[in-house]
Amino acid sequence: MGNQQYWDAVYETKARDAVSWYAPRLSTSVSLIQRVTAANKSAAIIDIGAGQATLVDELLADGFSDLSALDISGEAIAKSKHRLGPAHERVGWYCADITTASLPANRFDVWHDRAVFHFLTLAPHRERYVAQARDAVRPGGYVVLATFGPDGPLQCSGLPVVRYDSTQLAAVFKDAFELTDNALENHTTPAGKTQQFLYAVLRRL
């Protein structure tokens, strides 16, 4: 899915609102997180592949108090911290590849990922991702995942991706999670193109 140097270069050379996955607000993600937490503001939430997205900003503004963010790019994390200002100290930051990251066991109530999982084109990497989520999410917790849908693009940021329908995605996670909800959503990129995303909610068994 590209190494740290690759993604550092992306975030060094492109403005925050120039990458294809940019959205000024992550309304669907926030709504799903609010739902699965039953608005419990102390729920522990981690944003996987946080990049320069504003999810942590929006959740902080909504009153959530136990937030973490992970990204492979130190450049993206540095820019997000700068954007947040002093509020960045209220977020736990991980600079790591999600397939090899060291995360605390049974720590999180919600694992959020918008636009990382579809970059995992190799089965061993997908298996490691699921194992990471299984170990880090508490039983009864949730993965809120947005990945390219069946009519989504075949590449993103110059890299190949994997597209999913809900049945395929549920099968990948079936050993540790059950699919409880899903919906397709069209995302308009800054260049005006349409990308189909599949949003899925998976409950930790």
Image (tube, rainbow, N blue to C red):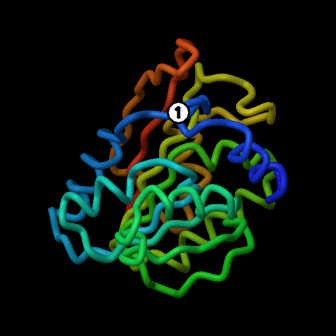
In the picture, measured across the screen, residue 86 lies left or right of residue 195, that is left
Asked whether residue 205 is in view, the answer is no
Mark 1 sits on what residue?
17
Would you place residue 136 above or below residue 199 in this image? below
Q: Nearer the viewer, residue 58 or 172?
A: 58
Looking at the picture, tell me which residue is in the foreground, 51 or 98.
Answer: 51
Q: Residue 152: x, y in percent?
A: 60, 23
In this rendering, the answer to whether 175 lies above or below 2 is below
- Residue 74, quarter of the rendered image: bottom right
Looking at this view, name the residue that lies furthest to the left.
39
Q: Is residue 48 above or below residue 163?
A: below
Can residue 28 be seen at all in this image of the molecule?
yes
For disc 1, the neighbor class at 10 Å (few under 14, some 14 to 19, many from 20) is: some
**Relative to 7, 205 lies left or right:** left
For the point 45% across and 75% down, the residue is 137
Q: Secondary structure at mark 1?
A: loop
- For residue 155, which quarter of the picture? top right
Query: Going by the image, does 114 lie left or right of 129?
Result: left
- Residue drawn at x 27%, y 63% is 60
Residue 64 x %, y %: 24, 68
| Residue with the most extreme top position | 192
Q: Position of residue 14 (x, y in %)?
A: 67, 36
Q: Residue flagged by tag 1: what amino acid is it?
A: Asp
Tell which of 175 and 21 is nearer to you.
21
Q: Quadrant of the C terminus?
A: bottom left
Position in image of residue 133 (x %, y %): 55, 69
Q: Residue at x 42, y 45 (%)?
A: 200
Q: Is residue 4 left or right of residue 47?
A: right
**Which of 31/174 is in front?**
31
